[in-house]
Amino acid sequence: ATDAAATGYHSVASLEEDMRRLAEEHPEIAELQQIGRSVEGRPLWALRIGERRDSTRKVAVLGCHHAREWLAVEVPYLLAEHLLENSSSDPVQRWLQQGEVWVAPMVNPDGHEYTRVDHRLWRKNRRPNRDGSVGVDPNRNYGYMWGSLDINTSSHVPSDQTYVGPRAFSEPEVRAVRDLVARERFSGVLSYHSYSQLILYPWGYTSEPIADRDDFAEHRDLAQDMEQLIRKVHGRTYVAQQSSELYPTAGDSSDWTYGEYDAVSLTIELRPASAEEGGFIVPSSEIQPCWEENRPAAFGFIQHVLERPER
Ligand code: 0X9
Ligand code: ZN
């Protein structure tokens, strides 16, 4: 990675370059697709990884809805790289024969670029709002129960950090994810954020559990398995819980992919556990250990989704 040299993290440009390189080095199993454009016109990229185009088992891995959550770019990127570099040995080989893994490591490139050059703790996208403020929270802009809450973690005030936007899917970054999901019909969607070390399952908009008992048990058990897989690597505790227990919000990606498509849907909050340990600002020396501890859990998720019985 090129100008990642400065920070140890990807920039919009170095990520695009590295994703392009991965696709070029693995032409039989990887394809770089532009899935849309951001508010400021940046291309939004996803890597499709798999041997066939007609598989019915597909996983999507999303990163960096929130600009300042830099680790949430690196874990999905490293997952894509790892799958491609290990595509001729099991279990990866088997997965890529049966199904597909789509990776979009940077849903919010405008915001990310802004954090790199200007305002390190920017969260939202860079939408100019009608009141002169900037930014919609991409993780409040999805269309399941959108706008149903009016609280400080899910706000209708444009200048707020968690502004839900003027309507569901008002943001091109979120529409790009919507259109990809509508087209590919993923059986599972994993969305990376930071920080707090959590594995979150729907619902986020209500403290009611998912009504379908099988779905509830499936999400809870999978999240708890992933908690164990993470802990085994470096001893870190990532807590599995319902999203709304963290705080209620409406319009996040997992509520929509579960609510609209019944996809197995989890949100992972990466390192660290607390603000005292650095919050959003994590030295690049932690990228590798963070990826290491998350790899078995990401594998667990992929394995579960690709190999579960058809419903
Ligand atoms: O607030 C968010 O969008 C996520 N946390 S973050 O600190 N990365 O911003 C959590 C979303 C999980 N969903 C709910 N809590 N409903
Ligand atoms: Zn986030």
Image (cartoon, grey):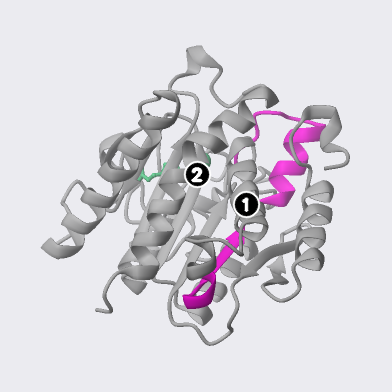
> For this rendering, which residue is in front, 30 or 136?
30
**Label 1 within 8 A of ligand 2 by Cβ:** no
**Point 72% across, 50% down: residue:** 109
* Tag 2 residue: 295
Furthest residue toward right: 2
Question: x, y (%) of residue 92?
Answer: 52, 62
* Relative horizontal placement of residue 225, taking residue 29 as reference (left or right): left
The secondary structure type at the circle numbered 2 is helix
Question: x, y (%) of residue 207?
Answer: 19, 46
User: Do labels 2 and 1 touch, CB within 8 Å?
Assistant: yes
Q: CA distance from mark 2 to mark 1?
A: 9 Å
Q: Is residue 223 above or below residue 301?
A: above
Q: Amino acid at mark 2?
A: Arg
> For this rendering, which residue is in front, 49 or 206?
49
* Relative horizontal placement of residue 78, taking residue 191 as reference (left or right): right
Question: x, y (%) of residue 304?
Answer: 34, 61
Question: x, y (%) of residue 203?
Answer: 27, 53
Q: Which mark is residue 82?
A: 1
Q: Which mark is residue 288?
A: none
**Point 83% across, 47% down: residue:** 14
Q: Amino acid at mark 1?
A: His
Q: Is residue 238 above or below residue 49?
A: above
Tell me where the magenta segment starts and ends, as one range: 96-123
Q: Is residue 198 above or below residue 182?
A: above
